[in-house]
Image (spheres, helix red, strand yellow):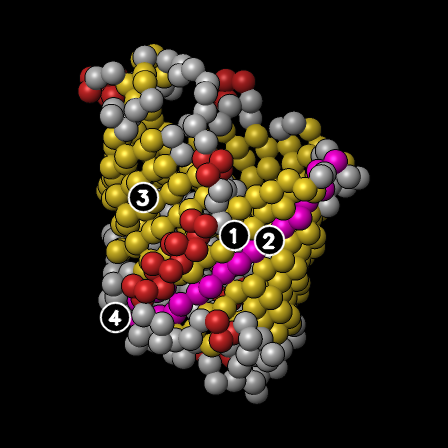
Amino acid sequence: MKHSIVSLFPRDIRTGRLFSISTAAAALLLPAFAFAESPAAIKPLSSNLGQTCTQNAYGVDNALDALRCGSVHGSLRSLYYSTKNAYFVRNNNQDTASYGGNILFQTAPYYGISAGVGGIYQQQWRSPGAGRGVTELATNQNGFGEAWLRWQYQDFRFTAGDQRIDIPFMSDYDWRITPILFRAVDMHWGDKTDFVHATKIYRYKPWRSDKFLATSAYSAIKEETNGAWAVGAGRSKQVGDMTLTGQLWYESYDDYVNIFYSEAHSQWKTAPWQPDIGVQFIRGSGEGERLRGEVDSTSYGVQLALTPTSKVKWSINYNHIVSNPEAYLNGALVTPYSSSTSSGKYFAQPYFTSTQDLGTGNAYSTRISYQIMPALSIGTYYSFMDLKSSASAPSRNQSEYVVFGIYQFDGALKGLSLSNFLGVQTSPVYDYSFWQNRVSLQYNF
């Protein structure tokens, strides 16, 4: 039984065959009633630009109304990051303040077709000096952001162009000034819990650039690839007072890694503290040229989320990442679009760094937040990373302590928020602690 799960995804499976099998299997997870047509009458379309248009099942009645009843969305932001001994490097002190954001104009659908075009902008308030710039904030950016065409009918949509993607280990991770974007074709059928999804990625735009690149988040690797593709499905079911949800994904990153991701939750919304128990399994194996090295990674996770009161939320998280001295970073998962960016779907993760970039072993974290008033929330994170980057290396035994506060304005200032996250990482492997403070002022519309 030792290899019963790992061997489900041998490295010599052909991409086309696996794509077809995965899509067919995903479709079987969804019964016909999951996407039943809504009998509700179609209401007039009102845009956030103050226009109202009549519409049918496929959108507005004419092309002029598609423009007139379009909408504008975006985010204007100013971020200030300050670090001391960043990433445990003595005197690697950073101090960067930048402003900018993103904006998107989206037409109303006409015969099911809509278009979106937007821009991104980032500028430093002042130069932080040589060696003191936070990479993703220190580069000035301006240009087009999202630019896509979409066809949608009820719960089915197909989008082609430069867009946001949100699937495991491929997401916009929109918590800097400009989002991560993908040049892709993307298909989604369903809602957030009952769905079939397929994506083909050709290029991506990281935080640090306003260009779409054929490389990855591993910036030291200059070889270009053919991007990535992914298929996935999700399903939910109500059993008495328990809600069951689950999702399965297969992702293939050209010349890097194939990833199988699965996650399931059981939640009791009417029980005291509304317990939500989650489990996950992640498997990564090498693909093509293996530009990051041999990949042979297996991870397991469990999570308990609780709501002791309507104002308090608490989660406890654990992951075990199996060590493998013959593989990249002792068996860690290679994630070409989220390395040094986000821990992605890992339950247990630090706030300032990424679980999969630290090694293998055991990872623990907990988070608690308290809504003091409708506009103000405070909270704290704690994580402990008992991870090793190689068989001979000592464990990081890294502790991270973070406190935060978020204030959401209302009334005439609705959409404006101010947040501050302050934390420190410590490890017996290093002589110096890593401090970081993040202040954000943003207006979403």
- Residue topped by disc 1: 247
What residue is pinned by disc 3? 163
The image's mark for residue 264 is 2
Decide if residue 380 is in sight here.
no
Magenta span covers which residues?
Answer: 252-270
* Distance from Cα at disc 4 to Cα at disc 2: 36 Å
Nearer the observer, 308 or 250: 250
Residue at the (25%, 70%) spot, across then down: 223
Q: From the image, give the main secondary structure of the stretch colored magenta.
A: strand
Label whose residue precedes the other's in the sequence (2 or 3): 3
Q: Residue, x 63% and y 50% (percent of image)? A: 265
Instruction: State if disc 1 and disc 2 touch (CB < 8 Å).
Output: yes
Judge left or right: residue 353 versus residue 185. right
Q: Which of marks 2 and 3 is in front?
A: 2
Q: Distance between the residues labelled 3 and 1?
A: 23 Å
- The Cα–Cα distance between marks 2 and 3, rounded to whole angstroms, is 28 Å
* Foreground tag (4 vs 2): 2
Quarter holding residue 263: bottom right
